[in-house]
């Protein structure tokens, strides 16, 4: 195998991606499909799932609910015949507010989806990844390596995802399973637009002002694209990424502060 071939995942990988109906998740799903993988995904929104290619397996699931995750993994492994790659993508932005203004129910929902959801998926897929000596990819955020004022539940959950990733890499590595976290930066799309709008409202500033300030903290002074995240996911599942494990890999243009 030459170096260029080692950058592409082998055909036929059995891949489960959570929250693949839209956003980054959908781009990851479509990238693996383009790489000739067999893909199964889930989402909360059936209308998003309905727009996917019919060849992609799909089901409704809330990763914050154990019963939903149990059913998702059972159906995905039945449909695919096992798992080689699991992409823990599901996550929510949560509230933008001062710590004394955040309601307990909102804090708990962020933790349930962003952290507990990744635990629940890892809990049920680890046995399959051991069998295939596969790959677990956890989506974190640059907010998992930097402080993020007014976004404490989100940042806390993403720092925890990095800790979960490094711990699982140590735990599952002897069985041949690689575990890494991908830390997206400011990803162009509807989600970051909502985040900027909410932050501008919380701070009493304009959308344009907050957007300029955000980009001023990025060395490359630009947003990244969802396809950049998908490209990293593909590389980590390719032979060239075969010795990368336990890493928190930022795809962000070098975000220096939040």
Image: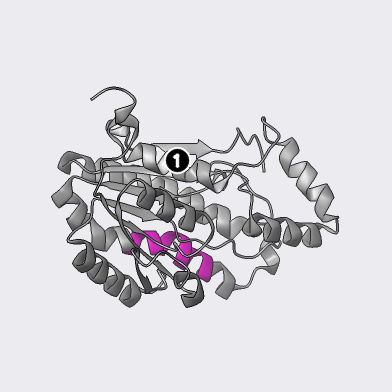
Which residues are the magenta region? 109-120
- Name above or below for residue 83 compared with residue 247: below
Residue 205 locus on image (x, y percent): 85, 55
Label 1: state its secondary structure.
Answer: helix
The residue located at (47%, 65%) in the rendering is: 21
Instruction: Tell me which secondary structure the magenta stretch mostly adopts.
Output: helix
Query: x, y percentage for residue 91?
Result: 50, 61
| Quadrant including the N terminus | top left
Residue 127's image quarter? bottom left
Residue 93 rendering spot, x and y as whole percentages: 59, 61
Please identify the quadrant where the C terminus is shown: top right
Q: Is residue 144 visible?
A: no
**Residue beneath disc 1:** 231
Residue 112 belongs to magenta span: yes
Residue shown at 48% from the left, 53% from the top: 27
Instruction: Please tell me whether residue 141 belongs to the stretch shown in magenta.
Output: no
248 shown above or below 83: above
Which residue shows up at 51% across the image and 54% down it?
Answer: 24
State the residue lying farthest toward the left. 131
Q: How many marks?
A: 1
Residue furthest toward the top?
A: 2
Q: Residue 221 vs residue 31: left or right?
A: right
Picture coordinates of residue 244, whole percent (x, y): 32, 33
Name the colouring of the figure.
one colour
- Residue 188 showing in the rendered view: yes
């Amino acid at each position: 195998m030459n170096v260029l071939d080692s950058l592409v995942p082998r055909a036929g990988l059995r891949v489960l991606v959570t929250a693949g109906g839209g956003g980054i998740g959908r781009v990851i799903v479509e990238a693996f499909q383009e790489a000739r993988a067999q893909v199964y995904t889930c989402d909360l929104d059936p209308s998003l799932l309905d727009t996917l290619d019919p060849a992609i397996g799909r089901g409704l699931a809330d990763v914050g609910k154990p019963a939903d995750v149990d059913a998702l993994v059972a159906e995905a492994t039945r449909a695919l015949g096992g798992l080689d790659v699991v992409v823990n993508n599901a996550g929510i932005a949560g509230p933008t507010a001062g710590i004394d203004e955040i309601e307990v129910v909102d804090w708990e929902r962020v933790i349930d989806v962003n952290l507990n959801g990744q635990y629940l998926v890892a809990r049920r897929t680890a046995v399959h990844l051991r069998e295939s000596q596969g790959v677990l990819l956890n989506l974190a955020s640059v907010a998992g390596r930097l402080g993020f004022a007014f976004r404490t539940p989100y940042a806390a959950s993403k720092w925890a995802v990095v800790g979960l990733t490094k711990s699982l890499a140590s735990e599952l590595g002897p069985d041949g399973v690689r575990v890494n976290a991908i830390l997206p930066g400011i990803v162009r799309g509807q989600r970051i637009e909502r985040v900027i709008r909410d932050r501008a409202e919380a701070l009493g500033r304009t959308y344009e002002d907050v957007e300029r300030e955000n980009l001023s903290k990025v060395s490359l002074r630009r947003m990244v694209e969802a396809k950049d995240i998908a490209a990293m996911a593909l590389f980590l599942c390719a032979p060239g990424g075969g010795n990368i494990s336990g890493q928190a890999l930022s795809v962000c243009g070098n975000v220096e502060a939040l």
